[in-house]
Image: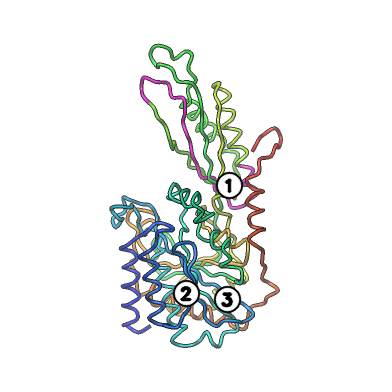
Amino acid sequence: MSSTHYEEIKKLGESIYENPELGYKEEHTKQAVIDYLKKYNPECTIQKFSTTGLRTTLGEGKPIHIAFLAELDAVYAPSHFRADSETGAAHNCGHYTQVAIALALYRQLVESKAYEQFDYTISFIFVPAEEYLDLAFRDELIQKGVISHYGGKPEAMKLGVFDDIDVSICVHAMGGEFSKRTIEIDCDLAGFLYKRYTFKGKSTHAGVDPFSSVNAYNMSTLFHTAISLGRQQLDEKEKVRLNPIVMESDMSTNVIPNQIKVGTDLRTLSTPYMQTVAKRLDAAAQGSALALQGEVEIDTQMGYLPFQQDRYLSSFVKAAYEEEEQIEDIWEDNSISAAGDIGDLSYMMPCIQIGYSGFTGTIHGDDFIDVDPEYIYDIFPKFLFQVLDKLNGKIDRSKLYKRSYEEYVQLVQSILEQKEEHGIEA
């Protein structure tokens, strides 16, 4: 990349970093993408979807269709040192660099016309709302019929954005600091459910008549204790993560609380085990309420499906790495309890997410920022160009798979179904 192009794409990435936007609100970022695409390919056609999503295609009509994805949104992190003072949004997950990397790669393909020689079509898809947050706003959009899914990729799946795609490639910042320029392949992600438990009791005066009360706060405390004791029974290889918090309460020191809402993510590496742990959580909540003569309402929402990266596609990334002198190290075959809506997309088709270093601070933390812009905005996009070249003429269609959005919906519904097993209601 020439120094002019490098400075331009670095400035674009910094501009997105300095103007973070939450999901389905990424208007500044959307316009920055449109402006860049039109600058380097004035004749390009840009498809818009789900408020801020964008898709543009190079090399129409070839037998295989690859999507290169970038995520537009920021995290809600009001204590981050560069957070938006009004919205609390901050780019402490690295998505701002994804967008810049995708645009740098797009420019390389257009200027070199390399895509014309590829035996596959490639679409660049800029997806909103990967982060699972700001749910009250997204509930409003759902009620108005603007969207149907909290996550941007499932929403795009519903809209048919991926119907003609055979393979999807995404990239993502690696958390932590690295002494060497590093990539990561085959890092599997957890899936999660979003569980809410509303404990209900009976209010009385805490001083005069606590004897006839039913204390909802005590039920929630017993529930937290049951979860803690039950962790011993959880399978370590599933990387189960729970983070129960009190979401809503209206407590006063002189009134016994009659309602407490507890919420938690439930993260596991496999869908069946997710269902198993969900049954245990529900049983703990029901038992805690019953033990203290109260009641509990249980609400379960699907978060994202687990993501197992496609090892066949990753082999092309590994082959490109072995010929790349400027990237010094590679991480392989890890699994973490972070989740992403690429897990949902991977149910429909083979997907990979290539990690890249170049950051300092804690991912999703208050101090996260890039420290190696040359690697992120110059060397890494050139490497991705080599990955695309490795794929040219080599993709074995028999090793790919395709499922429909309707099949995805059926799977999610089956996960959320309430069943009676061994006396435990899920």
Question: Which one is in front in this view, the residue at disc 1 or the one at disc 3?
Answer: 3
Residue for badge 3: 316
**Quick one: label 3 or label 2, which is nearer the N terminus?**
2
Badge 3 element:
helix
The vertical placement of 65 against 114, above or below, is above
Residue type pointed to by label 1: Glu
Return the residue found at the far top: 208
Percent x, y of residue 140: 46, 49
Q: In front of the other: label 3 or label 2? A: 2
Q: CA distance from mark 3 to mark 2?
A: 29 Å
Near-viewer residue (275 or 360): 275
The label on residue 46 is 2
Q: CA distance from mark 1 to mark 3?
A: 31 Å
Which residue is depicted at the point 41% across and 77% down? 37
- Report the disc number at residue 236: 1
Counting residues from the start of the chain, the first of labels 1 and 2 encountered is 2
The x, y position of residue 417, in whole percent, is: 66, 44
Residue sitting nearer the eye, 165 or 246 = 165
Residue 76 at what x, y percent from top left? Answer: 38, 52
> In front here: 45 or 180?
45
Q: Is residue 267 magenta?
A: yes
For marks 1 and 2, give the CA distance.
45 Å
- Give, as a three-letter code, the residue at label 3: Phe
Evaluate whether residue 115 shows in this view: yes
Q: Is residue 238 left or right of residue 8?
A: right
Q: Which SS class for mark 1?
A: helix
Task: Read off the magenta span.
Answer: 252-277
Q: Decide if residue 330 is in sight here.
A: no
Question: With respect to residue 271, does 225 lie above or below?
Answer: above
